[in-house]
Amino acid sequence: MKLNSVDISKTASASSIVFEALRRAIIEGEVKEGEPLRQDEIARLFNTSRIPVREAISRLEEQGLVKTQRYKGAVVSGLSATEAEEIFDFRALIEPEVIRRAVPLMSPETLDRARSSWAAFSASADPMRWGDLNRDFHATLYRASGLQYHLDVIDNAMDRIDRYLRAQLVMSNGMERANEEHIAIWEACVAGNAAQAAELTRIHISGARESLLQNINSLR
Amino acid sequence: MKLNSVDISKTASASSIVFEALRRAIIEGEVKEGEPLRQDEIARLFNTSRIPVREAISRLEEQGLVKTQRYKGAVVSGLSATEAEEIFDFRALIEPEVIRRAVPLMSPETLDRARSSWAAFSASADPMRWGDLNRDFHATLYRASGLQYHLDVIDNAMDRIDRYLRAQLVMSNGMERANEEHIAIWEACVAGNAAQAAELTRIHISGARESLLQNINSLR
DNA sequence: ATAAGATAAATTGGATTCAATAGAAAATGA
DNA sequence: TCATTTTCTATTGAATCCAATTTATCTTAT
């Protein structure tokens, strides 16, 4: 008798399932800023008790994705134009450095994976996928750096602005320009030109910053 | 009848009390890497139930201060030399930029507060206080930048290495050099020289990095 | 009609209890 | 004696229940 055994300590707990679902709903803009997260409602939705929901919400708060107030519950965090600006500046500081460190370490497999990523972005007619594909492209390149701490921090920065970025990509047809920039970054990586990749990344982020800041109030 | 009213929504929940106490115990090195955090034990210690303890632990995990494994509980995170190195590099990237942005915005009150801070550091005979005083000095200067997102990220980076840094300060009598560097940074700020303050901050962090990396294995 | 007070309902915070899992100890077999 | 299996204990995951607080609704007074 052949059984597919599963290491049960690796299966997802209720709280991590809820956390991931809520995180995704927030970064994809399915729940809006200011929207309350009702523990009992979410618990019903996931057919669990409120305890794992509370734990998930605690984690989301540490990620800055929700704000809780004692006895009043959690609401989805908003992001002011000032905050968005700051987070872009932060990314423009960190990500060029990460990709600069990553370039000399990139394997042919990584570069191939990244090419598939921008190609998929380019080819996708489904706006709902652009956000994930955009992140996948950048994550693939950055991962080669091995700088895990930096990557975790970048992930959080992206989570914080993703819902707006995604809406912006859909609304403004900014994907064409994003794609051109992705290809240019990728080409610099292929050429092993770390400084060029870093500079193009910085320009890419700054461009997204300007574009988003012009429209942030209509993206909420 | 005069009553001192308290906004009850601002009083600390059980879980946030436990979180803060555990966070402090970890960054001060009172619980060591690898040490398990027993939910029932902590709950007894704080005279509460396990639920707030679980929530606190969930939050600590998001901060990277503990690692949990399903059905096995939480242990205090360790930090390898590679990880420590990366976090210092990260700080050396971010903190100079933050102070560079802060310098033109520093008020006389801020500068006076920072002077008090390095003076207190200099005067303190209590090694247990050096860690807090060190952080207080830097936080005072950086806060003037108004870059709240950067500050939160720096706080987390510091939390991740603080237990080792504190042990290092005590063990190596590094406080004298740290203090000289604090004064030099402060003087650059007083002079309004943002570039100098940034460079001295970068050197300060890099020096701490080299020093810590030499000794990290004996600091656990 | 509006404001204030009282009551009810909704929601959160957390204590207690039950279920599940991992690890330790004891029992059994070779 | 050693290896394997079984049983027991410790601990975690989460369901249920109770207490506390906030919000909504209803009633009364002006």
Image: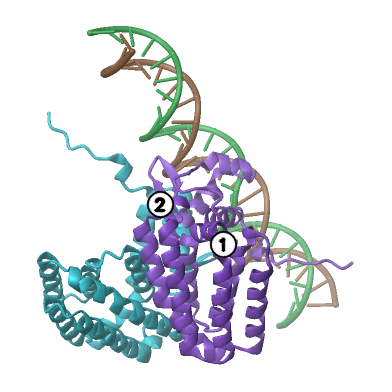
Chain colours: A purple, B cyan, C brown, D green
- Please state, as top left, top right, bottom left or bottom right, where the C terminus of chain B lies in the image: bottom left
Q: State which quadrant residue A113 falls in.
A: bottom right
Residue shown at 44% from the left, 56% from the top: A215
Above or below residue B39? Residue B97 is below
> In front: mark 1 or mark 2?
1
Q: Report the amino acid beneath label 2.
A: Ser
Q: Chain of mark 2?
A: B
Whether residue A123 sits left or right of residue B200 in the image: it is: right
Per the rendering, the mark at residue A173 is: 1
Q: Give percent across and percent down for residue B108.
A: 10, 67
Q: Secondary structure at mark 1?
A: loop
Give the number of the disc on residue B15.
Answer: 2
Q: Residue D27, relative to residue A32: is it above or below? A: above
Quarter holding the N terminus of chain B?
Answer: top left
Residue drawn at point x = 53 percent, y = 88 percent: A103
How many neighbours does mark 1 have within 10 angstroms: few (below 14), some (14-19), or many (20 or more)?
few
Residue sitting nearer the eye, A210 or A133: A210
The chain to which mark 1 is attached is A
Q: Nearer the viewer, residue A201 or B148?
A: A201
**Dot 2: what SS?**
helix
Residue B104 placed where, x, y %?
18, 72
Q: Residue B98: x percent and y percent? A: 29, 73
Q: Position of residue B11 (x, y in %)?
A: 30, 45
